[in-house]
């Protein structure tokens, strides 16, 4: 049933699993607190021996040096991100169902969501002591156009995928986004990806394939829309990297929040004419 929505316990289980994974990684990274012995080679010069002795005495441990620490703030950010993403998908699916599903107004809903982001960005710039506005130039805005267009495509096609199939199926296909990013980065942007990273994609791709085969509500429209969203997301990541490598643009943008706000505004402006073309006749 394409109207199926995941139950809250499953979402909470995913969030808990993510937190456990983070704790495990953190413990594995910080758990080894043993000092590393420094071998002192025999040197003929007494002065060189003295320099080596002074250097080795100043180094107590290379890693650790105390009890393992856990970044609870970072874990909280991940937890709220998972929780917020869950409720976003549920609310999104409910809105799409109320508007007629895939035959209704998915483009309108997607663009209006970007519009809410625009209002929030403007509020943060206008409110006192909130966020300093960016000082970008006209050329900077032109360079942001590819990023904004790809962001618009990634967001709107994700909404299309939700409108055409179950939430679970759309999220399964979206989980393959790292594989799309790796292929696009290698073939079209000339980036080198290590063998370890390619091997790390095998369980991701295998899990997506396995979950898709077992998915009871397989929908080709949802599959295609989610894959196109992944392609747009991969292009967006690479174009964003090119943008931020431009001289001085980081300083003119000012912050990551400003960068995301500008991308959302450009995406919204791209989405408006597409909205009119696709669904304007339904109003």
Image (tube, rainbow, N blue to C red):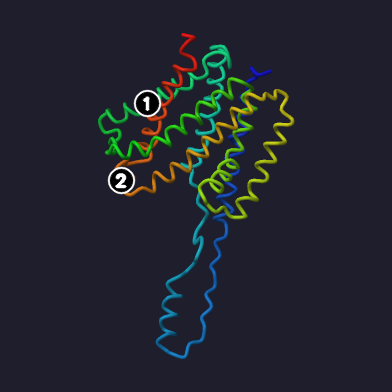
Q: Residue furthest top?
A: 283
Q: Residues within 10 Å of mark 1 (few under 14, many from 20)?
A: many
Q: Where the N terminus falls, by quadrant?
A: top right
For residue 210, the mark is: none
Residue displayed at 53% across by 67% down: 35
Disc 2 on helix, strand or loop? helix
The residue that disc 2 covers is 251
Q: Position of residue 261 (x, y in %)?
A: 37, 32
Q: Position of residue 15 (x, y in %)?
A: 58, 34
> Disc 1 or 2, which lies upstream in sequence?
1
Q: Residue furthest bottom?
A: 44
The residue that disc 1 covers is 118
115 and 81: which is toward the camera = 115
90 and 57: which is toward the camera = 90
From the viewer's perspective, is 125 left or right of 205?
left
Q: Position of residue 148 (x, y in %)?
A: 42, 33
Residue displayed at 54% across by 33% down: 82
Quadrant in which residue 209 is drawn? top right
163, above or below 73, in the image: above
């Amino acid at each position: 049933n394409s109207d199926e929505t995941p139950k809250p316990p499953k979402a909470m289980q995913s969030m808990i699993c993510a937190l456990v994974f983070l704790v495990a990684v953190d413990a594995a990274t910080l758990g080894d607190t043993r000092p590393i012995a420094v071998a002192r080679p025999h040197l003929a010069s007494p002065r060189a021996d003295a320099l080596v002795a002074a250097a080795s005495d100043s180094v107590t441990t290379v890693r650790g040096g105390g009890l393992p620490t856990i970044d609870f703030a970072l874990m909280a950010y991940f937890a709220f991100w998972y929780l917020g993403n869950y409720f976003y998908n549920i609310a999104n699916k409910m809105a799409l169902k109320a508007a007629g599903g895939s035959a209704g107004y998915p483009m309108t809903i997607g663009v209006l969501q970007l519009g809410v982001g625009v209002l929030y960005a403007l509020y943060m710039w206008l409110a006192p002591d909130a966020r300093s506005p960016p000082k970008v130039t006209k050329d900077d805005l032109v360079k942001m156009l590819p990023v904004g267009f790809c962001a618009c495509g990634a967001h709107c096609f994700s909404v299309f995928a939700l409108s055409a199939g179950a939430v679970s199926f759309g999220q399964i296909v979206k989980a393959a986004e790292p594989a799309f990013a790796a292929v696009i980065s290698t073939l079209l942007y000339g980036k080198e990806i290590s063998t370890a990273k390619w091997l790390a994609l095998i369980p991701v791709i295998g899990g997506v394939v396995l979950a898709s085969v077992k998915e009871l509500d397989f929908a080709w429209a949802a599959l295609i829309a989610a894959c196109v969203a992944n392609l747009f997301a991969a292009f967006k990541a690479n174009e964003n990297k090119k943008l931020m490598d431009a001289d001085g643009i980081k300083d003119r943008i000012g912050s990551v929040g400003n960068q995301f706000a500008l991308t959302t505004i450009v995406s919204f402006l791209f989405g408006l004419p597409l909205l009119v073309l696709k669904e304007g006749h339904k109003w």
